[in-house]
Image (tube, helix red, strand yellow):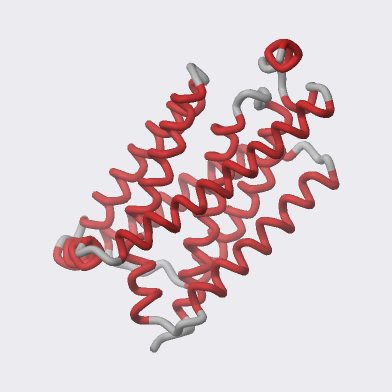
Amino acid sequence: MDSYVHSAGIPAIEARVDERTAFIRRTYLHLAGAVAAFLAIEVILLRSALPEIMLRFIDGNRYGWLMILGAFILAGWMARSLAASGASTTTQYLGLGLYVFAEGIIFVPILYLAVYFSSPEVLPNAAILTGLLFAGLTAVAFVSRTDFSFLRGALTIGGFVALGAIVGGTIFGFGLGLLFSVAMVGLAGAAILYDTSKILRHYPTDRHVAASLELFASVALMFWYILRIMMRFSRR
């Protein structure tokens, strides 16, 4: 216990091997828990009236999707702030829980369309492909031991460009086609590499909850756009 407290403030990569291993194990267990909680939230929400309410709101309001996206961005910022503050483990859990719930809300419309208006195999195939890509990118980050911090600038610029395209498409009425979705899958893949490297090199061993939030955010982004691509080519 004393050794854990002693090394809790230093990056995981500089901690003792057993502590670094425990940190990685806790991080990915919490990521799995976040995914499970997300699935449970979706099962509940998809059986409620919320999907139809959200779709009517989006269809009946030109800026409806921007309002939902804005609320999600605000919730995501609050969740990350709570998780990154490191004030306590409870605060980190609060941030992770808030983020998972916010993702659960924003995913409702696309999952509703995938379940009821796309081929039955679309949703599981998108989930499997996302899992395989995540596993592959994680393996690359761990095996190569490369510091992917150089991706930060590209991810920041890419994120702002993507947000600008989404806002512009909503305001001016142009669609974001297949190439945009493919580019966003690439951006999410780069984010997974960057996040995996970052949590090892910059996160202390007591920030496993915050680390799992970062990974969950990138996985959710990748799943969203892989699902969009598959839905584009499959209709019931």
Q: Is residue 180 above or below residue 236?
A: above
Residue at image location 37% in from the left, 53% down from the top: 104
- What is the residue that sits farthest to the bottom in this orientation? 236
Where residue 62 appears, x then y in whole percent? 19, 61
Where residue 31 appears, x then y in whole percent? 58, 45
- What is the residue that sits farthest to the front in this orientation? 1
Where residue 130 appears, x then y in whole percent? 60, 63
Quarter where residue 95 is shown: top left
Quarter of the picture holding the C terminus: bottom left
Foreground residue, 156 or 212? 212
Foreground residue, 177 or 201? 201
User: Is 114 situated left or right of 1 in this image?
Assistant: left
Foreground residue, 151 or 211? 211
Where residue 173 appears, x then y in whole percent? 28, 66
Residue at image location 38% in from the left, 31% down from the top: 78
- What is the residue that sits farthest to the left in this orientation? 60
User: Is 133 situated left or right of 47 in this image?
Assistant: right
Q: Is residue 1 above or below residue 79?
A: above
User: Is 138 situated left or right of 82 in this image?
Assistant: right
Quarter of the picture holding the N terminus: top right
User: Is 194 situated left or right of 231 in this image?
Assistant: right
Q: Is residue 31 above or below residue 85?
A: below
Residue at image location 21% in from the left, 68% down from the top: 52
Residue at image location 27% in from the left, 51% down from the top: 68
Number of on-image labels: 0
